[in-house]
Image (cartoon, helix red, strand yellow):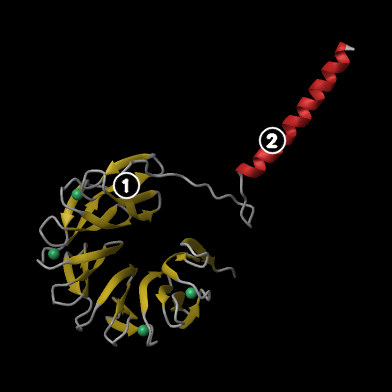
Amino acid sequence: MTTQIKYIVYGLLIVGLTFLFINCKKISEPEDENGGEWIETQITTNDSDQWQPAVYENRIVWQDTRNGNDDLYMYDLLTSAEIQITTNNSDQRRPAIYGDKIVWQDNRNGNRDIYMYDLSTSTETQITTDNSNQEQPAIYEDKIVWQDNRNGNEDIYMFDLLTNTETAITTIVSRKGNPSIYEDKIVWWDERNGNFDIYLYNLLTSTETQITTDNSGQYFPIIYGNRIIWQDFRNGNDDIYMYDFLTSTQTQITTNESAQQFPTIYGDKIVWRDQRNSNWDIYMAELVL
Ligand SMILES: [Ca+2]
Ligand SMILES: [Ca+2]
Ligand SMILES: [Ca+2]
Ligand SMILES: [Ca+2]
């Protein structure tokens, strides 16, 4: 009799635990359509504000207010170590990273300049010295590009770390901004036609190309590989569009009548912020061949 009760209790226990295990597994492991799993990780825990993140391989850099002014910090996913990149009491903002090099805009000289920190040599270098504002840097290998106000309007400038030379990429008087660089191609937004369009400069051929001609605004271009993506208002609301150099064609990526903004691209993945659910969400489009 005692043995029988033991078996019944053990049996119920095993059934109960199995049921719990299966259901807990379902709740704790949401699977995506490909059967993979999205694992979320908190990178910063400091009580102050961390924002403007940029990523290169295992390194994440961001703008951080923990010291009462903006500094740059970096987290290494391989070593799980956080390090402070800048210590100057003025504001260091808008970081970009490529390999061992981090660039940003810095107001320590009373106006904004571009600075660089090299993780391999632990050295900081001032890239621009002009008294006007140099802002919004981007970097690819040894080339740094930024938005420059030295001519009384916004131009795009470049510094080549190999040749130690600074070059004006644009000279025409107009509002410009948000430069992005990939290999020998630089893109930016440009108001020279009375509305914002996307322009491209090819460093190999020294030629400038107008990518968009629509009368509405095209903004925030990002270049990666053969593709340029941007935020586009031609449909009366913000959508994401793409230009492909290989096919010389433009593609409308989003068609939802709410706003899709601030796109970014890596490989075949395009990510943006999206208002279709009445609050801002992050959406992604992936090219599946
Ligand atoms: Ca600082
Ligand atoms: Ca300056
Ligand atoms: Ca336009
Ligand atoms: Ca839209």
Badge 2 marks a residue whose secondary structure is helix
Three-letter residue code for mark 1: Met
Furthest-front residue in this view: 278
- Distance from the alpha carbon under mark 2 to that under mark 1: 38 Å
Rendered position, 40 above or below 239: above
- Tell me: 215 left or right of 138: right
Q: The N terminus appears in which quarter of the rendering?
A: top right
Rendered position, 154 above or below 136: below
Mark 2 or mark 1, whichever is nearer to me: 2
Q: Residue 74 — which label?
A: 1
Among numbered discs 2 and 1, the one appearing first in the sequence: 2
Q: Is mark 2 within 8 Å of ligand 4?
A: no
Q: Which residue is mark 2?
A: 21
Where on the picture, by quarter, is residue 234?
bottom left
Q: Residue at x 62, y 51 (%)?
A: 31
Q: Residue at x 15, y 63 (%)?
A: 128
Furthest-top residue in this view: 2
Between residues 20 and 224, which one lies in front from this camera angle? 20
Rendered position, 224 above or below 244: above
Residue 269: percent from left, percent from top? 49, 64
Rendered position, 215 above or below 232: below
Q: Is mark 1 within 8 Å of ligand 1?
A: no
Q: Residue 50 — which label?
A: none
Furthest-right residue in this view: 1
Residue 259: percent from left, percent from top? 46, 71
Three-letter residue code for mark 2: Phe
Q: Residue at x 75, y 31 (%)?
A: 16
Where on the picture, by quarter, is residue 142?
bottom left
Badge 1 marks a residue whose secondary structure is strand
- Tell me: 2 left or right of 210: right
